[in-house]
Amino acid sequence: MKLLVAIALSAGLIFSSAFAPKLGKRGSGISVVSTRDSVYFVSAPIVRFSQVQTPCVDVAIGDTSFVAELDLGLRGDATLTRDLLDQIADKSFVNKRSVYSWRGKKYIEDVYKVPQMKIGGISFDHPKVQAENKAFPEDAILVKAGHERAPRELGRLGWKLFYHTNLFLDFKNSKIIFADSIDTLKKHGYPMDMFVKTPLLLDRGLVEFEAVSINKPIRCVLDTGATWNIFHMETQKLVPELVWDPKNTIEVRSFQIGGKDFGTLFAHSLPIHLPIKVEAIIGMEFLSDKSVFIDFRKKLLYFSSL
């Protein structure tokens, strides 16, 4: 059995030298959804869940097709392996970016622009893709001694790729949906009245929301690229020691979002060393049996409450 965990933001958060998000006006950004109508509902299957339980979808850039992880902890459009990026001829170099892993290590990655990226029946114009530093994945997945490291997917899709649309994550039915509004989702049979609504926080360049845990508010990163839920802790211990120590698994009796108590939340206490303070990361451990609607237009998050 392979014991693999993508801890904290899959391979870490990606920041440029300026940490504040620069999104631009809707409709004039980098990644623009191509749709003929203002009302749209486009579904794309989750083709599999990776060895670390992250959702994966089929992606095409020109004639190059591949499977990519949906990693909403990634602040950017997409990251591809260097080998895959070298197969894409139609690209132009943009700049270099500093990348910080969740353990605080800094890496430099090349950034390119490609004409178009397609996911199912929807396309994104002129996204920026980063060439993943080959040393970077070593910080992403911890493997218990005596076990093998599983191969990663060839790409990861970050949240900024989807900023000019709205994204519905239907993990129970293994699909993602691009929809213009909550009303459109209702017309297609989704019981959105049963969802809990909370503000979507993008001011720090992350997909974040506020929850109440242990009777106090806590700011959480929504990260489909993380296996576990992580609560930050201050410690001088080495991370590998902490990860496999059962004493660092905590049981939070009450986890509330938008006034709704989701009951007990299991999480791991680990140090998160980033240029900004991150209190908690909510990963697939919590999200796998949920549906989540990210309404970028109205800056709202909806969680299924059933």
Image (cartoon, rainbow, N blue to C red):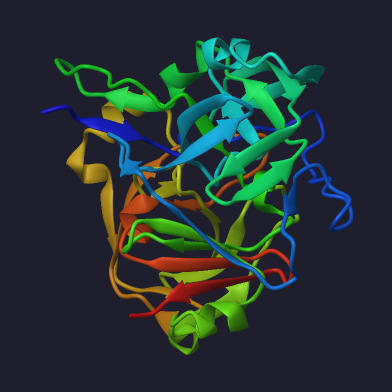
**Quadrant in which residue 142 is drawn:** top left
201, 39: nearer the viewer: 39
143 vs 202: above or below:
above
> In the image, is 133 to the left or to the right of 57?
right
69, 7: nearer the viewer: 69
Name the residue furthest left: 1
- Residue at point 69% right, 59% down? 165
Numbered-mark total? 0
**Quadrant in which residue 99 is drawn:** top right
- Residue at point 59% right, 28% down? 79
Q: Quadrant of the C terminus?
A: bottom left
Pinpoint residue 133: horizontal percent, then vertical percent.
57, 14
Pinpoint residue 194: horizontal percent, then vertical percent.
43, 87
Residue 12 at least partly seen: no
Pinpoint residue 150: horizontal percent, then vertical percent.
28, 22
Pinpoint residue 92: horizontal percent, then vertical percent.
80, 18
274, 161: nearer the viewer: 161
73 vs 222: above or below:
above
> In the image, is 295 to the left or to the right of 227?
right
Q: Quadrant of the N terminus?
A: top left
Residue 171 at least partly seen: yes
217 vs 88: above or below:
below
- Residue at point 61% right, 41% down? 118
273, 116: nearer the viewer: 116
Name the residue furthest bottom: 193
